[in-house]
């Protein structure tokens, strides 16, 4: 049962209760919300995803994408791809540094409205070991030995480890260079082209619905673990047609500024969804329908269901929260 508004007094509680009694499934009268049926066996197995979504269609679509026969788990037991949570290690052993400082390296940090604004990864901070070692202990490439372990986890693709679902912009970024992140989780085992292809897919409606199935402690600012990210269903990027179609879309959209999630429909999200539909031979109209539903979700728009404001919304982003 999803409420679109809360009762204000006892008379409204009584009205809501009666409307609920009269509605076995579907929209309740008087604008209270919607009653949805969900398979009991899924909930017994721990699937409470209908509680995440206002739209029961999005709940069902997210489940179907997560179990789609055309997709495979990102981090399969025998696979080469691995998701790494580097934020905690960075915050524990490293500190911010000036770009170019000996032993420093670039990372992805910001993830909110002013963070990553394009699908191309843009490092926005440099970090260095807190306890620097002597010059003689440095590697020949000017990276301190203590940094070697974390830089081995750098990837061409990074997935968000948590963000404001209204004011953030991207679920994943990619580039020809490899980075680690604080608030972003690198994926190792990918070539640049493969990373670009997966960045398009994860930012598409199919990818975002899967990622948002695991909201952590809050719907408005969910956090995602490496384990959950590893369970996302992805296309077979060893398929040349799939990889080329998605990677070419990354190339054509890499410089386009991506609006905030709450801004709704935009050209770049249309291009991503169309590329996924073409690559996977899926129905583009169905993708567009789900995308429009996602735009209307309260925790994406920053508004209650059915509430639309003419004036611009204030930025309530908590983009600098430390999440993993």
Image (cartoon, rainbow, N blue to C red):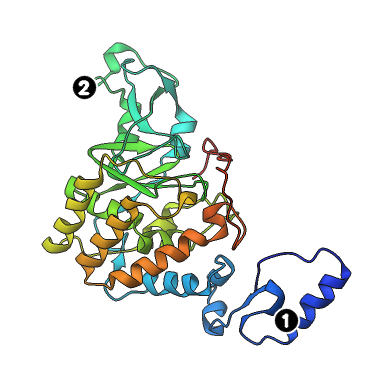
Q: Position of residue 46 (x, y in %)?
A: 55, 73
How far is mark 1 from mark 2, CA to CA? Answer: 67 Å
Residue under label 1: 20
Q: Position of residue 12 (x, y in %)?
A: 82, 71
Q: Quadrant of residue 3?
A: bottom right
Name the residue nearer the viewer: 320 or 165. 165
Crowding near the residue tagged with mark 1, few <14, some 14–19, many ≥20 C-alpha atoms within 10 Å: some
Query: Which residue reaches farthest front?
Result: 310
Crowding near the residue tagged with mark 2, few <14, some 14–19, many ≥20 C-alpha atoms within 10 Å: few
Q: Residue at image x 29%, y 51%? A: 199
Query: Which residue reaches farthest left?
Result: 240
Residue under label 2: 141
Decide which of tag 1 and tag 2 comes sooner along the chain.
1
- Residue 185's place in the image compared with 132, above or below, is below
Secondary structure type for disc 2: loop
Q: Position of residue 91 (x, y in %)?
A: 48, 32
Q: Position of residue 31 (x, y in %)?
A: 68, 72
Query: Which residue reaches farthest right?
Result: 10
- Residue 91's place in the image compared with 235, above or below, is above
Residue 239 appears in the rendering: no
Mark nearest the camera among 1 and 2 is 1
């Amino acid at each position: 049962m999803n409420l679109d508004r809360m009762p204000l007094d006892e008379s409204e509680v009584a009205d809501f209760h009666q409307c609920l009694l009269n509605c076995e499934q579907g929209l309740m009268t008087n604008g209270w919300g919607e009653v949805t049926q969900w398979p009991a066996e899924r909930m017994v197995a721990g699937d409470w995803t209908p509680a995440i979504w206002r739209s029961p269609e999005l709940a069902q679509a997210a489940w179907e994408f997560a179990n789609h026969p055309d997709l495979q788990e990102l981090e399969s037991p025998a696979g080469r791809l691995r998701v790494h949570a580097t934020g905690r290690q960075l915050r524990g052993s490293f500190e911010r540094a000036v770009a170019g400082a000996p032993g420093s390296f670039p990372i992805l940090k910001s993830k909110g409205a002013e963070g990553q604004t394009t699908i191309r990864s843009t490092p926005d901070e440099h970090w260095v070991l807190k306890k620097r070692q002597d010059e003689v202990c440095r590697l020949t490439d000017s990276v301190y030995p203590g940094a070697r372990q974390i830089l081995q986890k750098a990837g061409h693709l990074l997935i968000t480890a948590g963000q404001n679902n209204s004011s953030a912009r991207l679920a994943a970024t990619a580039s020809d260079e490899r980075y680690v992140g604080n608030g972003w989780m690198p994926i190792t085992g990918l070539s640049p082209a493969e990373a670009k292809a997966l960045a398009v897919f994860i930012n598409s409606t199919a990818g975002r619905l899967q990622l948002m199935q695991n909201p952590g402690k809050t719907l408005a600012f969910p956090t995602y673990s490496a384990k959950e990210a590893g369970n996302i269903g992805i296309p077979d990027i060893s398929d040349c047609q799939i990889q080329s179609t998605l990677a070419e879309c990354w190339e054509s959209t890499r410089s386009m500024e991506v609006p905030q999630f709450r801004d709704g429909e935009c050209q770049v999200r249309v291009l991503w969804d169309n590329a996924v539909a073409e690559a996977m031979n899926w129905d583009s109209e169905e993708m567009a329908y789900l995308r429009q539903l996602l735009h209307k979700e309260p925790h994406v728009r920053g508004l209650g269901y059915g509430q639309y404001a003419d004036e611009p919304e204030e930025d309530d982003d908590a983009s600098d929260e430390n999440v993993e």
